[in-house]
Image (spheres, rainbow, N blue to C red):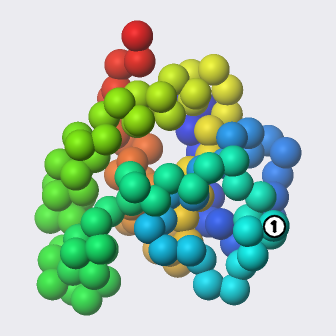
Amino acid sequence: MATKLKRIYEKLDPADGYRVLVDRLWPRGLTKEQARLDEWAKEIAPSNELRKALHEDRIGWAEFRRKYLAELEKHREQLRQLAARAQRGQLTLLYSSTETKQNNATVLAEYLGRLKTD
């Protein structure tokens, strides 16, 4: 599976392949033209409640990860399509967080890697 994670603010690279923004909120200071997205999949981003709980330090990373994986189950069919796209070519999941190791895109990539697409 060819899935790459990248901050939306990083320079566009033709090797990005299919570019999907996986945040619920649009990134600050960026126009849609600058983002050069193929898809904005805000419906598969963490719920507002979960996102706020993490950012306000009401829950830790482990709890966020567990709850977000549970939320992703509701979007299994759409996610199966993304996983299939990654099997056919490069898929880049874009996020705006400054946290590069513990963000929703890392959890989403983990989930996609475990999905069966046939």
Vertical arrangement, residue 77 with respect to residue 34, above or below: above
Vertical arrangement, residue 41 with respect to residue 61, above or below: above
Residue 24 quadrant? bottom left
Residue 32 percent coordinates (x, y): 73, 68
Instruction: Identify which residue is drawn at 56% across, 38% down.
Output: 3
Horizontally, residue 23 falls left or right of residue 64, namely: right
Residue 57 percent coordinates (x, y): 22, 86
- Is residue 68 or residue 63 the one in the foreground? 68
Q: Amino acid at mark 1?
A: Glu
Q: Secondary structure at mark 1?
A: helix
Instruction: Identify which residue is drawn at 75% across, 76% down.
Output: 31
Horizontally, residue 71 falls left or right of residue 8, namely: left
Vertical arrangement, residue 21 with respect to residue 18, above or below: below
Q: Quadrant of the N terminus?
A: top right
Residue 118 quadrant? top left
Instruction: Identify which residue is drawn at 79% across, 41% down.
Output: 15
What residue is disc 1 on?
A: 33
Residue 91 percent coordinates (x, y): 62, 38
Q: Is residue 17 visible?
A: yes
